[in-house]
Image: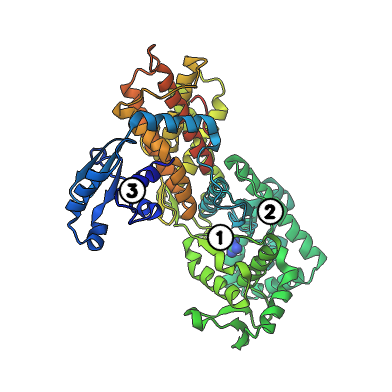
Amino acid sequence: MENKELVAKALSNALDNELSVEDIESKLERPKDSKMGDIAFPTFILAKKFRKAPQQIAGDIIEKIDQSDFDHVEAAGPYVNFFLDKSAFSENVLNSILDQKEQYGQNDDGKGGNVTIDMSSPNIAKPISMGHLRSTVIGNSVAEILRKNGYKPIKDNHLGDWGTQFGKLITAYLMWGNEEDVKKDPINNLVKYYVKFHKVDKEQPELDDVARDWFRKLENGDEKALKLWKWFRKVSIEAFEKIYNKLGVTFDTYNGEAFYNDKLQGVVDSLNEKGLLSKSQGATIVDLDKYNLNPALILKSDGASLYITRDIATAIYRDQTYHPAMNLYVVGSEQTYYFKQLKAVLMEMGVPSAKDLHHVPFGLITVNGKKLSTRSGRIILLDEVLNDSIDIAKKQIAQKNPDLPNKEEVAKEVGVGAIVFGDLKNEKINNIDFNLEDQLRFEGETGPYVQYAHARAESILRKAGDVDFTNVAKKLNDAESWNVVKLLNDFPARVRMACDEFEPSVIAKYSLRLAKAFNKYYAHTKILEDNDEKDARLALVKSVSIVLKESLRLLGVKAPDQM
Ligand code: ARG
């Protein structure tokens, strides 16, 4: 039985079932200071009902409550504080972890429902930015967290592979482009042409007409235009995949914006049938007054579709294909207003899953104080950031553990893990400034710190050799192991919370707390000393290793056994 349930049952009995177990359970608190017990019940919520002072209610409960399942129970002012029976509790927690292994914390809340996750979604012919990195790593982690909660995530990379900018790019390429250069370094060269277009076009505005013409040709399936577009798309995806591979992120589908081209007319027709379209200065719009939002622009006056037109088609396609329980869009907070409009249009259209559309926004990221942008040409390439991080990790490993056998691989896992963790430990809505050296320190709130705690646990287990994990944990009742056990017990609740809030930082922060508690335990305890408690201590170490590794996995971070 969960501890909160145990406490709630005892309380409900003591209160002559005046309050249900569920009701009580929802009111229970976990005191910050362990002197106040492990679980506390605030009695002031009953003061009105019982017409008594909270202190007195607490006293009455102590008189009546059956304490046999607990170490002891105390009244403290308006609280009843429960001190759990440490050995029984520890045995319970460790046994469930050792039994369930990486399944520990898994639940079935999602009942196998599909959840589409729109994530990463960089734009063709532009470098993948740190913003896209955030979407990639947050989306990937949210997917694993959803899976752990019984959902079936579907990760879709909604590539920005359509729009008037491709008319500009084709124009620029035909004027200044070179096939060999693009083959050698696709993204940088394509960006170069694009940036040059914007510069030259200031003096030669007629270039805009040429570009518009090329986009029209592309839309009409002109062979030359289509061939170039396909090629730009292909080399861009190849470049993105290098980064995805490094991050260890995969997608279920790569349905970019262009995938929906043949579905746009259907969207317009359906909006029309539902009487949702109106004209405004030549353009076709959906009025969203009743949502207190600006109108959604569906077609420009020249009939061209827009970003939102393609997103409406996308949402309808996902709705019909997956019948999703939820639709998530992991996209920066600068698009918050846009997603409100999108949801409103879909609600008006009566798309069934529209009410379960969630924009999962996140803040800006800068690297060592530098902003990222592609237009101005000031670009920090994500690939470079990852490589720098791996290099720093390599140097650290060379210093700390020069004899490590698979140095290269571990440096990659630590270097990449540091970036991913450094991103995910922040509540996603916060802006973050990334300092590489800081994220790579083995001390402090970093990925390597958690990885190192896991590797340390594994190293103890290697030294211990074969351990019998049956009949463990009876004798763990010192303060340090108690702290660790309580945190281990907390993991399933954190898994649920991270899912409810689409918030990987819940897991990242949890893993930091667990790593810290374990390091403290390690510093205070002779784990391998030969005595009666040795097996119990090793069971604790094994459990920590399992839960740290699983926490990191939920974040998309590897946990090397040695580092
Ligand atoms: N490509 C867009 C960008 O880089 C993000 C697309 C987000 N997804 C969507 N369905 N609108 O800003």
Q: Look at mark 2 in the image and give the residue it sits on.
A: 253
* Residue 286 location (% of width, % of height): 59, 81
> Which of the 4 quarters of the picture holds residue 193?
bottom right
- Numbered tag placed on residue 329 in the rendering: 1
Q: Between disc 1 and disc 3, whose residue precedes?
A: 3
Name the residue rendered at 36%, 28% in the picture: 87
Q: Is residue 524 left or right of residue 337?
A: left
In the image, the residue with mark 1 has its CB under 8 Å from the nearest atom of ligand 1:
yes
Badge 2 marks a residue whose secondary structure is loop
| Residue drawn at the location 53% of the way across and 59% of the way down | 331
Q: Position of residue 406 (x, y in %)?
A: 57, 23
Residue 13: mark in rendering: 3
What's the CA distance linking mark 1 and mark 3? 46 Å
Tell us which disc is closer to us: 1 or 3: 3
Closer-to-camera residue (436/134) = 134
Residue type indicated by callout 3: Asn
Numbered circle sitting on residue 102: none
**Residue located at (38% from left, 45% from top):** 4
